[in-house]
Amino acid sequence: DTAVSQTPKYLVTQMGNDKSIKCEQNLGHDTMYWYKQDSKKFLKIMFSYNNKELIINETVPNRFSPKSPDKAHLNLHINSLELGDSAVYFCASSLGLAGGRREQYFGPGTRLTVT
Amino acid sequence: DAKTTQPTSMDCAEGRAANLPCNHSTISGNEYVYWYRQIHSQGPQYIIHGLKNNETNEMASLIITEDRKSSTLILPHATLRDTAVYYCIVRVAGEAAGNKLTFGGGTRVLVKP
């Protein structure tokens, strides 16, 4: 019954490889996000999609490409992985963009380690 | 987005109220105050939010000063499971902002027995 799920939970790979992280939400939300939490524990938004349309793209290298096949899924594909991509990646979702109560529900995170 | 300032860390005793301050002196009229927390190795969890009035839910209370330049999150009876990093975030309400959350360093709260 997990609200926001991510796969895989752990991902260890070598520099230069291409990898994907999947995210699914069963909350009926229309907006999904990707955040990155680095080794210093700072959480930064990367992307958001509303009704499958890209809304936020926070100066992320174009090696990172989000894809939203439908409103319930937002996947993150990373090309040519670099050491600096090692981090925990969190997916989140919410209902709507504007107004008051728009809390985001976060997934459990995917710990990516690039060696 | 308005910036927030929080103490880096604080301890509190189990069973006592925990009062977490947040300064957001540059907040604008269309910005909400949100609180999230992150328990070790988990995704952030929404706690509460408010605009002008004080708010209470099953997890916490939020007290916002009249000038809206600061707020306090109150955990009424802290338990060991409340040990986490607590983030105070100011969020622009307009659609153009895309519901973006800008996380700062937060306050690391340690609840002690």
Image (spheres, coloured by chain):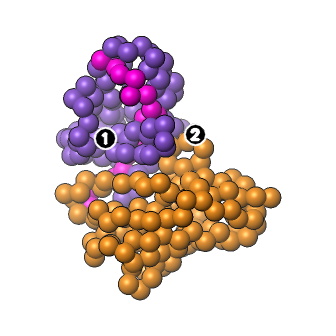
**Horizontal arrangement in the rendering, residue B83 relative to residue A62 (left or right):** right
Height in image: A44 above or below B48? above
Q: Which quadrant is home to the N terminus of chain B? A: bottom left
Could you say which is closer to the camera, residue B8 or residue B2? B8
**Which quarter of the picture shows residue B96?**
bottom left
Residue underneath mark 2? B41
**Horizontal arrangement in the rendering, residue B21 relative to residue B5 (left or right):** right
Residue A97 located within the stretch drawn in magenta: yes
Q: Which residues are magenta?
A: A80-100
Tell me if mark 2 has few (under 14), some (14-19) or many (20+) residues whose alpha carbon lies within 10 angstroms of its own: few
Q: Colour of chain B?
A: orange
Residue type beneath disc 1: Met
Residue A46 got which mark?
Answer: 1
Parent chain of label 1: A
Parent chain of label 2: B
Q: Position of residue B34 (x, y in %)?
A: 43, 64
Q: Colour of chain A?
A: purple
Q: Total number of numbered labels?
A: 2
Q: Position of residue A98 (x, y in %)?
A: 26, 61
